[in-house]
Image (cartoon, rainbow, N blue to C red):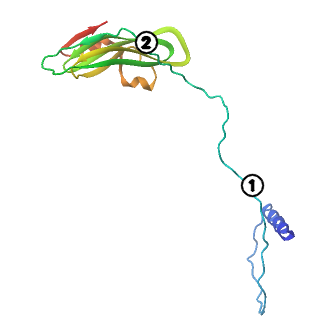
């Protein structure tokens, strides 16, 4: 143990000072015949900490967002569309949604416009007075459509809320400019 402590002291002394070599080392020329037995390095018994990794159950407070979906019976507009040479019709629910923050909003489907093989569902997103604080809210409206399989596009009048969820619909500020670009269109539903 003394040898180890001595070696440790030498290492500390050497490592704590600045040593610069001035001359090259040269060993003396010696002609000696030596008969020696093998030596032995010291051995050490080191006790390491016993480490166990696992899990424990502990009560902690975590933030939780609760979305309550409630099923209620409401009157939903129903639109039955007959098109010449269109074949079978299918009943589907056209739903428009927006995810908002800041203030409460309402969203309402105002009209459905048919143009060639497309249906344009025109909705209005309107900001209300009630403050939401730091919560987010999804608002929606729907219309049941019984029609042949058509390409449905949702157009929302209003400012697009800054939420990724809202990227699925097209938002416009001027609905009249949008409508002027439609060819051979007919309003098939209005509210």
Q: Are marks 1 and 2 in contact (CB under 8 Å)?
A: no
Residue 174: quadrant of the picture: top left
Rendered position, 111 above or below 13: above
Q: Which residue is mark 1?
A: 49
> Residue 19 in the image: x percent, y percent?
77, 66
Q: How many marks are shown on the rendered structure?
A: 2
Residue 48: quadrant of the picture: bottom right
> Residue 66 in the image: x percent, y percent?
54, 22
Crowd class of label 2 (few under 14; some 14 to 19; many from 20; radius 10 Å):
few
Q: Mark 1: which secondary structure?
A: loop
Q: Quadrant of the C terminus?
A: top left
Which of the pair 177/113 is nearer the observer? 113
Residue projecting furthest to the right: 2
Identify the disc placed on residue 181: none
> Residue 137 in the image: x percent, y percent?
49, 18
Which of the pair 86/166 is nearer the observer? 86
Which of the pair 77/32 is nearer the observer? 77
Q: Mark 2: which secondary structure?
A: loop
Q: Quadrant of the N terminus?
A: bottom right
Identify the disc placed on residue 72: 2
Q: Which one is closest to the eye, mark 1 or mark 2?
A: 2
Residue at 75% in and 70% down: 21
Q: Classify residue 174 as left or right of residue 102.
A: left
Rendered position, 129 above or below 90: above
Crowd class of label 1 (few under 14; some 14 to 19; many from 20; radius 10 Å):
few
Q: Classify residue 34 as left or right of residue 95.
A: right
Residue at 69% in and 50% down: 52
Residue at 35% in and 13% down: 123
**Considering only order in the chain, which callout, 2 or 1, is on the residue closer to the N terminus?**
1
> Residue 8 in the image: x percent, y percent?
81, 65
Residue 18: quadrant of the picture: bottom right
Distance between mark 1 and mark 2 Cα atoms: 62 Å
């Amino acid at each position: 143990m003394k040898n180890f402590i001595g070696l440790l002291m030498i290492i500390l002394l050497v490592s704590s000072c600045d040593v610069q070599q001035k001359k090259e080392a040269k060993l003396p020329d010696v002609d000696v015949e030596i008969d020696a037995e093998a030596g032995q390095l010291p051995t050490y018994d080191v006790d390491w900490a016993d480490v166990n990794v696992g899990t424990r159950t502990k009560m902690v407070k975590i933030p939780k967002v609760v979305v309550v979906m409630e099923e209620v019976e409401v009157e939903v507009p129903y639109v039955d569309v007959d098109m010449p040479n269109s074949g079978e019709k299918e009943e589907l629910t056209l739903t428009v949604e927006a995810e908002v923050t800041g203030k409460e909003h309402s969203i309402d489907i105002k009209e459905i416009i048919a143009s060639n093989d497309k249906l344009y569902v025109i909705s209005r997103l309107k900001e209300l007075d009630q403050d939401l604080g730091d919560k987010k809210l999804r608002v929606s409206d729907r219309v049941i459509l019984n029609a042949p399989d058509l390409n449905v596009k949702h157009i929302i009048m209003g400012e697009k809320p800054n939420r990724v969820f809202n990227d699925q619909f097209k938002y416009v500020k001027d609905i009249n400019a949008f409508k002027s670009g439609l060819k051979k269109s007919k309003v098939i539903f209005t509210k």
